[in-house]
Amino acid sequence: MACNHDGYVIGECVLQHLDEDSFELISGTHLQNWVEYNTVIDDHDVTIERDLQTSQNPKGAEGRTRTGFGMDGPNAEAIFREVVEGEAPSIPFFNFRRVKIAGCDVIALRHGMDGHKGGELSGAYADGPKVRDTRS
């Protein structure tokens, strides 16, 4: 949860640690705007690269760098096990593991709504169609 300086909730998000000094904030635009605003007014030594949705990106799909897919429902875990190369890792709730799907590097974040072992898959935008169509 992201809160303002008075403790009021701005929104919810997931912050993934990708590499040393590299993070991915998965959230709605309003929260991304709030984070960027605070880095500017508080003069933090960070660089922010916005990866706007294709429909909002001035460069369209060519301007995208990352993609994400949600998996949820009673079949999410079985589908995940089917598409991951090798043995699917056991991922604790709200943790992530790096996996390969269709030869592509993917981050699998485990969450789950309604008690299912669902999750979010994220990776390079160019790999999105291969990852999405793996089970077709």
Image (tube, grey):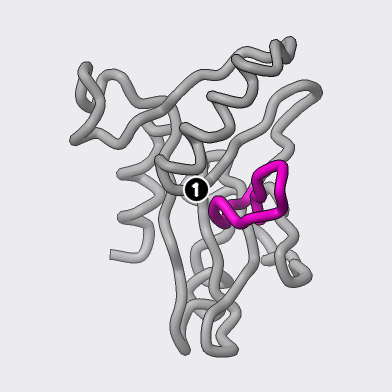
Residue under the image location 40 percent in, 36 percent down? 127
The amino acid type, in three-letter code, at marker 1 is Ser
Front residue of this view, candidates 48 and 78: 48
Q: Position of residue 64 (x, y in %)?
A: 35, 26
What secondary structure is marked by label 1? strand
Q: Is 120 above or below relative to 91?
A: above
Q: How many labels sit on residues?
A: 1
Q: Is residue 128 above or below residue 82?
A: above
Residue at screen point 34% across, 31% down? 52
- For the residue carrying disc 1, how many other residues have a C-alpha within 10 Å: few (<14), some (14-19), or many (20+)? few
Q: Quadrant of residue 12?
A: bottom right
Quarter placement of the N terminus: bottom right
Where is mark 1, residue-wise? 27
**Is residue 85 in view?**
no
Q: Is residue 110 visible?
A: yes
Up-down: is 49 above or below 24?
above
| Residue at 45%, 68% in the rendered image | 71
Q: Is residue 67 left or right of residue 97?
A: left
Q: Is residue 111 above or below residue 56?
A: below
Relative image position of residue 29 (x, y in whole percent): 40, 40
Query: Which residue is the extreme one toward the front?
Result: 6
- Residue under the point 60% across and 79% down: 117
User: In this view of the protein, which residue sits in the foreground, 128 or 46?
Assistant: 46
Please give left or right for residue 53 compared with residue 69 in the image: left
Residue 87 within the segment the image draws in magenta: no
Give the residues drawn in magenta, as a range: 1-14
Q: Is residue 63 left or right of residue 131?
A: left
- Residue 136, by quadrant, is bottom left
